Image (spheres, rainbow, N blue to C red):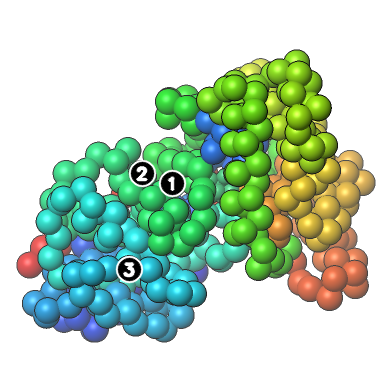
Amino acid sequence: MTNDLLIEKVKHTFQKRFESNPILCFSPGRINLIGEHTDYNQGFVFPAAIDKGIVTAVQKSKKSYCCAYSIDTNEVLEFSLKNICPIKNGGWRNYVLGIVAEIQKTNREIENFNLVFAGNIPSGAGLSSSAALENSIAFGLNELFELRFTKKEMIYISQKAEHNYVGVFCGIMDQYASMFGKDEHALLLDCRDLKATYFSIDFKEYDILLINTNVKHSLAESEYNERRLICENVAKRMGILALRDATVEGLLAVKEQITEEEYQKGLFIVEENKRVLKASKVITENDCKVFGELLFESHDGLQHQYKVSCSELDFLIDQAKKNPNVIGARMMGGGFGGCTINIVKKGASDTFIKTVTPIYFKKFNKNLSRYDVRISQGTHKIIMVKN
Ligand code: GLA
């Protein structure tokens, strides 16, 4: 669905349900060119916001409770602003409650409100529909109640909502990219001090192609949290603040005190950080070939060292390696399913997809989905209508 249609749908649904005109905002999903699992190690990432995301409508309510409606799942959540707590297996509800709870912790006043949202990014595809939802709610409530949060404060609210209400101890990459994205630019983000440098992205004779494995492993969240813990333990063992400060020599020095698994994971972070910096350098030199190789290397590390891939993703990367028109590819996002990002010669994407689809189906009995995305602007207000 196009963004225009999505906006219309959310607006009309809100007006019909709540008989008032809402504030509307759009929050995009993101791609990540390179730099996976480095964000919570205070390292570097290279994401970009895309032209698909979540539209959220909010307005004050005269009732004595809040009401949120998810168009895509056709589910309603009614709640009081007093005594907010997470719901077990609450899905999208915990994003709404989490944002409200985190705003309340800052002692800003919010009143009862109605909220409607819908999206055109699939969840579980590694495109950060979660961060898009969090940011759109935080941004919408900030507008509605004139809370005067800065964008940076809002992304921390989003991140904390995910930690405390969803239970995923995510880094800051997704929320940052979704909030601060810029048309046709990727951002090299230093996750230690949140300094971002924008890079104009034009792969000249190549396109970015996303292919969704349509796999979402239920273990993804616990595995994610476990990886984060391992990294923190290795850093502690090394006597450094975070693996961002680690070197190969430093890791070798503690190799005897940690397991091989831990060593490999630490090594992956050290190497992935280096790859991100190199990628941002070669992009300014228009060296797409080297950029592509870095993507393949990144996948290799994610598969064998960090162990967050899965057979479906690995299969797609092997197919990409076999195709001379694909100069780089890797899994994208947290892992265990979701999308691969591919750098494909212009005009060759159709043939690549046509070749891979039947063999993927034969092997996994699953269909692939293809996404063509445009690098686009971050979270913003669509219209401003106040009662
Ligand atoms: C998820 C998290 C991010 C980041 C990626 C992996 O998308 O939300 O913070 O850690 O995984 O790079």
Q: In the image, which disc is placed on residue 85?
A: 3
- Residue bearing mark 2: 156
Rendered image: mark on residue 175: 1
Q: Is residue 195 above or below residue 82?
A: above
Percent position (x, y) of residue 351? 83, 56
The reply to whether dot 1 and dot 2 touch (C-beta < 8 Å) is yes
Identify the residue at horizontal 78%, vertical 21% (top origin).
Answer: 252
Inter-mark Cα distance, 1 to 2: 8 Å
In the figure, residue 257 lies in which quadrant?
top right
Amino acid type assigned to the residue bearing label 3 in the image: Cys
Residue toward you, 44 or 90: 90
Left or right of residue 86, residue 262 in this image:
right
Residue 343 point in image, percent of width and height: 73, 41
- SS at mark 2 in the image: helix
The amino acid sitting under disc 2 is Tyr
Mark linked to residue 268: none
How far, Cα to Cα, is label 3 from label 1?
A: 22 Å
The local crowd at label 1, few if under 14, some if 14 to 19, many if 20 or more residues have their Cα within 10 Å, is many
For disc 1, does the CB lie below 8 Å from ligand 1? yes
Give the CA separation, mark 3 to mark 2.
19 Å
Q: Amino acid at mark 1?
A: Gln
Q: Is residue 272 above or below residue 132?
A: above
